[in-house]
Image (cartoon, rainbow, N blue to C red):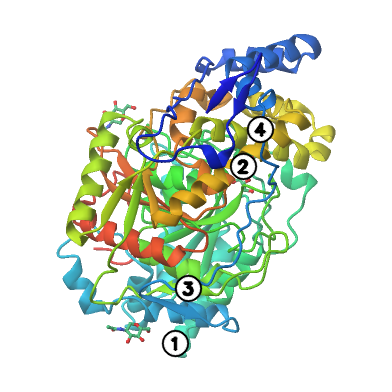
Amino acid sequence: MGLFNSCGVVYKPAKDVDLSPTSSEFYLKANVKAPRMIGVVVKIFAWVLEMRILGKLLLYVLKANNLIYKLIGDAEIEESPVFCPSHPVEEKESEEVKHIDFDLSETEQVQEAVSCLPTWSEREVNCLNPSFHRWTIMDYARAYHSKKTTPLTVAERFVAAVSESSKPPFNMSFFINYDVEDIMKQAAESTKRYELGRPLSVLDGVPIAVKDEIDCLPYPTTGGTSWLHKLRPCTGDASCVKYLRLCGALIVGKTNMHELGIGTSGINPHHGSTRNPYNSSRICGGSSSGSAAVVAAGLCPAALGVDGGGSVRIPASLCGVVGLKPTFGRVPHSGVLPLNWTVGMVGILAGTIEDAFIVYAAISSKLPSHQNTALPKLCFPLLNSSRPISSITLAKYGEWFNDCSDDIRVCCSNALDKLQKHHGWKSVEVTIPEIEVMRLAHYSTIASECSTSLSSYLEKLDSSQLGWDARVALAVYGSFSSKEYIKAQKIRNRQMYFHRKILAHADVIVSPTTGVTAYPILNAALKTGELDYINGAALVRYSIAGNFLGLPAVTVPVGYDKTGLPIGLQFIGRPWSEATLIHIACAMQALCIGDYKRPQIFYDLLSKE
Ligand SMILES: *[C@@H]1O[C@H](CO)[C@@H](O)[C@H](O)[C@H]1NC(C)=O
Ligand SMILES: *[C@@H]1O[C@H](CO)[C@@H](O)[C@H](O)[C@H]1NC(C)=O
Ligand SMILES: *[C@@H]1O[C@H](CO)[C@@H](O)[C@H](O)[C@H]1NC(C)=O
């Protein structure tokens, strides 16, 4: 890291930092200094933070305790700031991929993706009698084609299931909004298309849910609040929703989320706290909590989320589903709440990696969206190939990898061993320096961007309309200075350099997805939310590079802890290397799918026995 000057760290030039396994860089554990708070304590904390003088003082102490000044604000950093994690287009030859022409429509892209999947019979052989199987997009498409069922029947079952799960004793709080009439209308149109033998794509009539942070008619976009939609009406579909509709997808509603996406528990005082289908007294993780839960519970094979600090991968991992977050700029961002500009991106939650791939094919754009970066051609993995891709190198930073609960460490290490042995892939030990510094720099960035983007709304807002934990978060978010923001961008430059160097010698970096599994929801937290920065830091521990550096990343379920709660393994790739990531995730999934377990709360919409 470097020497300390009187008050801040003096960082060594990035190019002089040793990234080898024998590096003298030490691993700094998250030094979170904040008590876990629920109930009335959260309220008192929020009040004090909002006081003019006492609040400033408390914020100063909090930031000092959490090393914001020492590691960021007062640090000396030689590198210049990098404000946006855009990556140059490199047309790199990779194995077993298909390049997709720029001029294909969304439905043609989906068709191309399907042609890269193994055929039905191959798949049957590949996953011999899995103990538990969620219905996939292809299962729906086949059932509709063969007239075994229709989108209308599925929609009826969907509505019945959501209605049951919303009521006691379940109170799952999956959705913020779903409109039965709108769902039945789409389902009727889709059913008609199948009757005429003209479905739009394999997604036609397949239920897909959308996080309530993404614009989608006829719903308001609440962002998990009780007020944002009143100040910012939703006037049209976001691009990604538009593309899904063009493919015929049955858009079934807006999923629950952490208020404004500014937390990782998914506890929401306005719309109910989404409960984990594997144990309904546990959290789902956030912020895309509802999107993960509906996929886990079998209500949709896939759902859209937004990932600003692990918000897709964390809940996916806690709910035992796949989470894919493409490279910064790959999926168009228009029509997504602009809660922050340079770290948040649309991602996909799905029951299997193949389904995440199909939805990725539908929503990926060829046109630049963020800033003015050019986009490289889309590349799809040939998952139908009989030989698996050879010679993958996985980079692993042991100390970081092991900084998680015992169950997660054992489960993820075993999964990784199995993967390497089975395919003869090699893994290399590396040192990723300054990971905790990166987390703080990302926090300073997302906090500054979020409070800036909401500032005009917050001025008009009576703070009693905000949840208590959101009030605390916004008070902290608003406390960062321009010096801290810009120094954080210098840290971004360093980290982009470190990751580029590591990924020059490895195809992916591998880590657990979270440091803890789903923890219990405390009753006192339901109304006030909770402040749990220790569990919070453990949840986001492995997510930051995906957001701050814009790298693509995927999480795959690889097992369960002692109490049966899901565990995910994460792969972080080079910019634009989604095809390789999907390949690797698919290989990992194939080795684990036989042991997948059915959640406590599960609905079978296809084959009602
Ligand atoms: C795999 O899919 C590609 C693209 O559709 C096709 O060209 C190729 O022949 C397929 N390969 C096998 C082994 O089925
Ligand atoms: C940042 O924005 C993304 C999407 O815009 C969202 O998912 C995430 O929760 C936001 N995070 C914060 C802390 O504002
Ligand atoms: C679910 O979690 C609770 C604690 O929150 C625990 O008491 C209970 O045993 C768990 N249920 C199962 C079936 O493991």
Q: Relative to 364, is 374 on the left or the right? A: right
Residue drawn where x is 48% and y is 29% of the image: 537
Q: Mark 1 points at which residue?
A: 195
Residues marked 1 and 4 touching at CB (< 8 Å): no
Q: Which numbered disc flags the more N-terminal residue, 4 or 3?
A: 4
- Who's the residue at 29% across and 69% down the image? 389
Which label sits on residue 77?
Answer: 4
| Marks 4/3: CA–CA distance | 37 Å
Q: How far apart are marks 2 and 3 (CA)?
A: 27 Å
Residue on which disc 3 sits = 379
Of pointers 1 and 3, the one earlier in the residue sequence: 1
Q: Would residue 204 be found to the left or right of residue 458 on screen?
A: left
Q: Tell me residue 495's x, y (percent).
A: 55, 42
Answer above or below: position of 181 versus 6.
below
Residue pointed to by mark 2: 492
- Mark 1 → mark 3, Cα distance in angstroms: 33 Å
**Label 1, label 2: how far apart the Cα atoms are:** 53 Å
* Residue placed furthest toward the front: 16
Q: Nearer the viewer, residue 357 or 563?
A: 357
Which is more foreground, mark 1 or mark 3? Answer: 3
Q: Do the residues labelled 4 and 2 touch (CB within 8 Å)?
A: no
Q: Is mark 2 on a helix, strand or loop?
A: helix
Q: Which amino acid does label 3 sit on?
A: Cys
Q: Where is residue 358 in the image (x, y as percent from the top left)?
A: 44, 70
Q: Disc 3 on helix, strand or loop? A: strand
- Left/right placement of residue 331 relative to residue 609 reads right
Q: Residue 259 carries which label?
A: none
Q: Which of the two labelled residues, at mark 2 and mark 3, occupies the earlier sequence position?
A: 3
Disc 4 element: loop
